Amino acid sequence: MRNHRLLNITYENFVEIAKNKRCICFGAGYSISKIIKNIENDISIDYIVDSDFWKWGQEIDGYEVRAINQLWKEDMDSVVILITAKNFTEIEEMLLSEGLQNYYIYVLFFEHLIEKYDSMTINIQNIN
């Protein structure tokens, strides 16, 4: 993780930062529906971006999935990006390479995850 400021931000801090901004979720994968249900009462989700062009134009729980290049058109002072994908390190590197730092990573909100999920499954892969 390149942006160490993220380690000190709680979910409550994120909600406070995002309260007057539009939130763009980055990642339309397996867990996005559950994440949306957990956060949409706390923040204003605008849309979802994903790198998979097969998902572009689809709706997930009422939110449109758009191409990543939509982010570059945004006024970054009026949005926050919430990385909801499991490959958050790759996404973080891409955002940093574009000069974007107003992103947050959902899986780092441990206290929120523990509160919202009755049980958590951790998959550990041994790479040899």
Image (tube, rainbow, N blue to C red):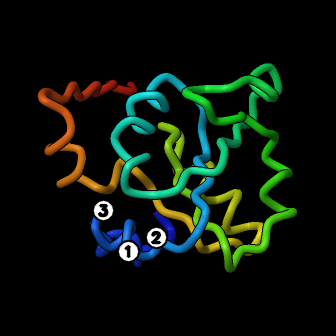
Kindly identify the residue that appears in the image at 74 percent across and 67 percent down: 97
Residue type, mark 2 in image: Lys
Q: Is residue 102 left or right of residue 17?
A: right
- Residue 115 location (% of width, % of height): 14, 45
Q: How many marks?
A: 3
Circles 1, 3 touching at the beta carbon (< 8 Å)? no
The picture quadrant where one finds residue 74 is bottom right
Residue 63 lies, with reference to residue 111, above or below; the image says: above
Report x, y in % for residue 32.
Answer: 49, 32
Q: Earlier in the sequence, mark 2 or mark 3?
A: 3
For residue 18, side relative to residue 116 (left or right): right
Amino acid residing under circle 3: Tyr
What residue lies at 84% left-to-right and 62% top-to-bottom?
Answer: 72
Element on which disc 3 rests? helix
- Residue at the spot 49% in from the left edge and 43% down from the top edge: 84
Q: Which residue is mark 2?
A: 19
Q: As displayed, is residue 124 above or below residue 83?
A: above
Mark 1: few/some/many CA within 10 Å (<14, 14-19, 20+): few
Label 2–label 1 contact, CB within 8 A: yes
Dot 2 alpha-carbon crowd within 10 angstroms: few under 14, some 14 to 19, many 20 or more: some
Q: Earlier in the sequence, mark 1 or mark 3?
A: 3
Q: Is residue 30 left or right of residue 47?
A: left
The amino acid on which the numbered mark 1 sits, given as a three-letter code, is Glu
| Disc on res. 16 | 1
Label 2 to label 3: alpha-carbon separation = 12 Å
Badge 3: residue crowd in 10 Å (few <14, some 14–19, many ≥20):
some
Quadrant housing the C terminus: top left
The numbered disc on residue 11 is 3
- The residue depicted at 43 percent of the width and 46 percent of the height is 40
Q: Where residue 71 sits: x, y (%)?
A: 78, 57
